[in-house]
Image (cartoon, grey):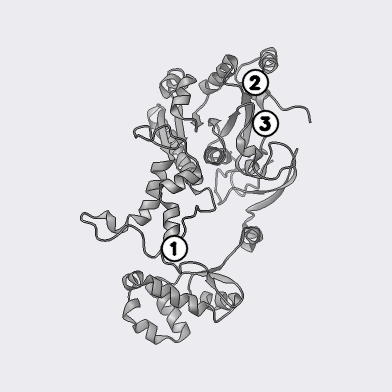
Amino acid sequence: MQSKDTAGTRGGPLEGVRVIDMTGVVMGPFASQILADFGADVVKVESPEGDTVRNIGPSRSAGMGPMYLALNRNKRSVVLDLRDPDGLAALERLIEGADVLLFNLRPASMGRLGLSYEQVAKVNPRIVYCGAYGFGEGGRYAGKPALDDLIQGAVALPSLVGRVTGEPRYLPTNVCDRTTGLTAVYSVLAALYARERTGRGQSIEVPMFETMTQFVLSDHMFGQTFDPPLGDAGYVRLLAKDRRPAKTKDGYVCVLIYIDKHWKNFCTMLGRQDMLEDPRFLRMSDRTRNVDALYAFVSETMLTRTTAEWIDALTKADIPVTPMHTPASLMDDPHLADVGLFEWIDHPTEGRIRQMNVPGTWSDTPPSIRRHAPLLGENTREVLAEAGYDAAAIDRLLAKGAAREPAAR
């Protein structure tokens, strides 16, 4: 299953890198899928029960739900029972030949398995050992459970939403999982680059709480940046009550009229010289201090025309504007069709499914989609054979339940 490569004849930029992926749900699989899209050979090690995300959402086959399909292409699935000494020994053999070990188990759990960094580095000193979990080991929250909703609350996201809406709410996306997953990706890539220079692997900790604290407070530390403080925490423009899609005569439009050029063009288009001369709005700093009044004026004005009329007028005035999509309409966006982001494929067991291709283009080593999201244990035999197990040894592991493969379908 090869996606369309527009340039270059070599594999992806991570071709030849082997990743042992001991992660589940969203954060870790999102990170390992990006590494896999970039050409790494990602071996997804699952328990006999499988990654829990397999069972989220509608599915045609057990364990092949839409979120699993969206997060696990380009990987090979191996099922090992790490409670069985032979299953754990098989994992250790896989790690010996790997470049990266990515996990989201708590460090204490890895230690109990005999898979601490010190233990792993003794057999593979070049390993990039990356743990992505809730809280840094140096703090008092170390080892506490962490899920996206919990971390959203811990880093004040519901509180910020509540300042706008009057009621704290979680963001309707797994923003903490995915942001931390991206952090894990660039951390692994940087460590691989460092290894090319030094020959040494290293241990990396990617904690959700600290990662997301930096993510949120980069915007919202605001006046608390200084000593003594120059104001409260919270970027006032992002917290303005009318910072939302503007209602038009027949729908909604997303427009940002903020910098001096856009404000001048907007008022000129409307023939509102009085607004250009209003001391509340003369400069960007003035508009920031009076952002509620600014957004209220824009919202009221947007009601006077249809969405299509506003998109045409604002585009001609060189003011940033876009229609407001729903998830369903986003999948029909014409630009995304132009660049081929969405593609219908035939999955060998799940039938026709929609997938998203790798965003962006590369001139020489393009990422690609080479494999479908695997069944639970689909690749157990081949991966164990690559690790040096002969057919009889693999049969013994399967017979005792230390390893598993899919039932006949």
The residue furthest right is 409
| Real-space Cα separation, disc 3 to disc 1, in angstroms | 44 Å
State the residue at coordinates (46%, 76%): 298
Give percent across and percent down for residue 400.
67, 15
Does dot 2 land on a helix, a strand or a loop?
A: strand
Residue 190 appears in the picture as rendered:
no
Crowd tier of the residue under label 1, counting other residues whose Cα lies within 10 Å: few below 14, some 14–19, many 20 or above: some
Residue located beneath label 3 in the image: 376
Asked if the residue under mark 2 is in contact with the one under mark 3, i.e. CB atoms within 8 Å, the reply is no
Amino acid type of disc 3? Leu
The residue furthest left is 228
Q: Earlier in the sequence, mark 3 or mark 1?
A: 1
Give percent across and percent down for residue 196.
42, 31
Above or below for 11 versus 43 = below
The residue furthest front is 167
Amino acid type of disc 2? Ala
Residue located beneath label 2 in the image: 403
Q: Earlier in the sequence, mark 3 or mark 2?
A: 3
Residue located beneath label 1 in the image: 164
Does dot 1 land on a helix, a strand or a loop?
A: helix
Q: Which one is closest to the eye, mark 3 or mark 1?
A: 1
Above or below for 96 versus 344 = above
- Quadrant including the C terminus: top right
Give percent across and percent down for residue 289.
33, 70
Judging depth in this view, the residue of 315 and 216 nearest the camera is 216
